[in-house]
Every structure is written in structure tokens, then in C-alpha cells.
Image (cartoon, helix red, strand yellow):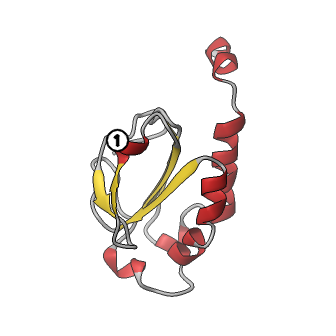
């Protein structure tokens, strides 16, 4: 299982909206918020997934691609949420038994905001 600091593997999935998503298209271009869920969870209105998707334009405005899929992604269990920078480094990884217990949409937006504000040179000095 992947963890913070690991790199997201390149993957191709179908989103819950039915679109094909290829991570390689966005790699090195945009940050990514990836939500992997059980298929049964993708349909329930008012669910966690609906709350995340309702904020999709906010993720886009912060230069992040928000992807929700019920398909398998190597190294990522279901349900889980991953936030990774544009180079694929995972900065946040959460998995829980219940989808509704995953990281809140507000917290996910905070992680994306962190990615846009962090200073890679300063982090290198801290190591």
C-alpha cells in the first residue's frame, strides 16, 4: 500500500462520471486529488462523493485535478483518498472502512492549497 512520500503510479481509470482519466496526461502539469471508492458508493446522493464533486471547480481553480473512481488503482485500497503534487509525490493519504469517514472536502482543499504555497527549495534545506 502506498503512503505519504511515495509516488502515485501511472494509471488509467474511468471516473464515476464515465470519463476516461489517464494520470500521465496530468503528470507534471497539475496536482491530483484521487478518490477511490467502492462502486456502490458512487450513486448515493448527498454522499461524501457528492460533496467532493460539488467542490470540483474549487479544486480546478487551485490547479488540481479531482478524480473519483470506483476502479482499482495499484497500491491504493478502496475506499481511500490521495493528494499528490504535480510530480506525483503523495502528501496526503487516507483510507477508512467507510467512505464518509475520509478526509473532508474542506481539508482536501487545504492540502491542495498547501501544495500551491509550499517552497520546494525550503523543504530541501530542512532535510
From the viewer's perspective, is residue 81 above or below residue 119?
below
Residue placed under numbered mark 1 in the picture: 24
Instruction: Give the SS element for disc 1.
Output: helix
Taking the spot 70% from the left edge, 51% from the top edge, the residue there is: 110
**Of residues 103 and 64, the one drawn nearer to the viewer in this rendering:** 64
x, y (%) of residue 70? Answer: 33, 68
Name which quarter of the figure residue 6 lies in. Answer: top left
Q: Is residue 94 visible?
A: yes
Which quadrant of the figure contains the N terminus? top left
Name the quarter where the C terminus is drawn.
top right
Position of residue 60 measured from the top left corner of the image (x, y, whole percent): 60, 55
Q: Nearer the viewer, residue 63 or 102?
A: 63
- Residue 15 higher or lower than 23, as above or below: below
Q: Is residue 67 above or below residue 26?
A: below
Q: Residue at x 69, y 45 (%)?
A: 113
Q: Is residue 126 left or right of residue 19?
A: right
* Furthest residue in direction bottom, as rendered: 45
Point 28% across, 52% down: residue: 12
Image location (x, y in percent) of residue 5: 48, 32
Q: Residues within 10 Å of mark 1 (few under 14, many from 20)?
A: few
- Across and down, in percent, residue 105 comes to 63, 64
Left or right: residue 32 compared with residue 109: left
Amino acid at each position: 500500500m502506498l503512503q505519504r512520500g511515495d509516488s502515485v503510479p501511472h494509471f488509467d481509470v474511468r471516473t464515476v462520471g464515465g470519463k476516461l482519466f489517464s494520470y500521465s496526461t496530468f503528470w507534471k502539469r497539475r496536482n491530483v486529488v484521487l478518490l477511490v471508492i467502492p462502486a456502490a458508493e458512487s450513486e448515493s446522493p448527498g454522499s461524501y462523493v457528492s460533496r467532493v464533486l460539488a467542490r470540483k471547480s474549487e479544486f480546478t481553480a487551485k490547479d488540481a485535478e479531482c478524480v473519483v473512481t470506483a476502479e482499482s488503482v495499484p497500491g491504493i485500497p478502496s475506499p481511500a483518498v490521495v493528494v499528490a503534487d504535480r510530480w506525483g509525490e503523495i502528501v496526503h493519504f487516507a483510507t477508512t472502512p467507510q467512505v464518509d469517514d475520509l478526509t473532508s472536502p474542506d481539508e482536501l482543499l487545504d492540502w491542495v492549497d498547501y501544495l500551491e504555497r509550499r517552497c520546494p527549495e525550503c523543504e530541501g534545506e530542512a532535510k
